[in-house]
Image (cartoon, helix red, strand yellow):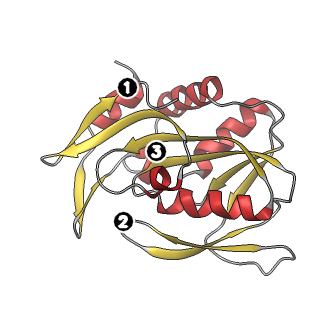
Amino acid sequence: MDQLRKSLLEAPVVQKGDYHYFVHPISDGVPMLRPELLREIVIRIVRKADLTDVDKIVAPEAMGIHISTAVSLMTDIPLVVVRKRDYGLEDEVEISKETGYSESEMYINDVREGDRVLVLDDVLSTGGTLTSLLDALGAIGAEVVDTVVVIKKVGGVNKVEESGYEPKTLINVDVVDGEVVIVDEEGDD
């Protein structure tokens, strides 16, 4: 059994309001992230992503950082982290995002019109973060070459699917009766 599948099947599920939230090393840093799991995920991302002429990797803070850092090290593609606080830098772009359990702002720096970017993230659940990020990159004039998310939680409303974006995923899961269930081990292409 691969590390990602095994770790998801062992992930605890907690309730946040009406939202069933699985706690996982990739999405939460809890329990600890083992190097063999991160290595497996990064290798799978590099194999799945279209890296043709990508100028920058773009990943939202916080849980996209460890994944995208490792991919950046393997590919020598620079990394831009979309931050949760503003710095007031020239050309900074503010994004408003709404997820299944929070609303907040994020800020993009160092992405310009014409940049070819790979967007990476840890989990696609409601699609609030990813949709807001992809819309903002489009408004900047960046070309999103590819989007890869490690884990997709199926079921419920997904803003990414409604908006027409088609991110690739490594594995698709659902939460049924308080447990994570693997829906598709190969994810979406």
**Residue 152 falls left or right of residue 118:** left
Q: Looking at the image, is mark 2 or mark 1 earlier in the sequence? A: 2
Instruction: Quickly name the residue at label 3.
Output: 26
> In the drawing, what numbered circle is on residue 52?
none
- Mark 1 = which residue? 185
Q: Secondary structure at mark 1?
A: loop
Residue sitting at the far left: 177
How much space separates mark 3 and mark 1, taking CA atoms? Answer: 16 Å
What distance separates the C-alpha of mark 2 from that of mark 3? Answer: 18 Å
Asked if the residue under mark 1 is in contact with the one under mark 3, i.e. CB atoms within 8 Å, the reply is no
Within-10-Å neighbours for mark 1: few <14, some 14–19, many 20+: some
| Residue 176 figure quarter | top left
The image position of residue 68, as x and y in percent, is 65, 44
For the residue marked with disc 1, what is the amino acid? Glu
Circle 3: is it few (<14), some (14-19), or many (20+) Cα within 10 Å?
many
> Is the residue 13 above or below the residue 33 in the image?
below
Camera sees residue 29: no
Q: Eyeballing the image, is 2 above or below 53?
A: above
Report which residue position mark 2 lands on.
100
Q: CA distance from mark 2 to mark 1?
A: 24 Å
Left or right of 55? Residue 153 is: left
Residue at position x 55%, y 56% from top?
A: 130
- Return the x and y of residue 140 as percentages of the image width and height: 78, 63
60 vs 128, left or right, is right
Dot placed on the residue nearer the N-terminal end, 3 or 1: 3
| Residue at left offset 79%, top offset 81% | 88
Q: Mark 2 or mark 3: name the one nearer the start of the chain.
A: 3
| Residue type at tag 2 | Gly
Q: Secondary structure at mark 2?
A: loop
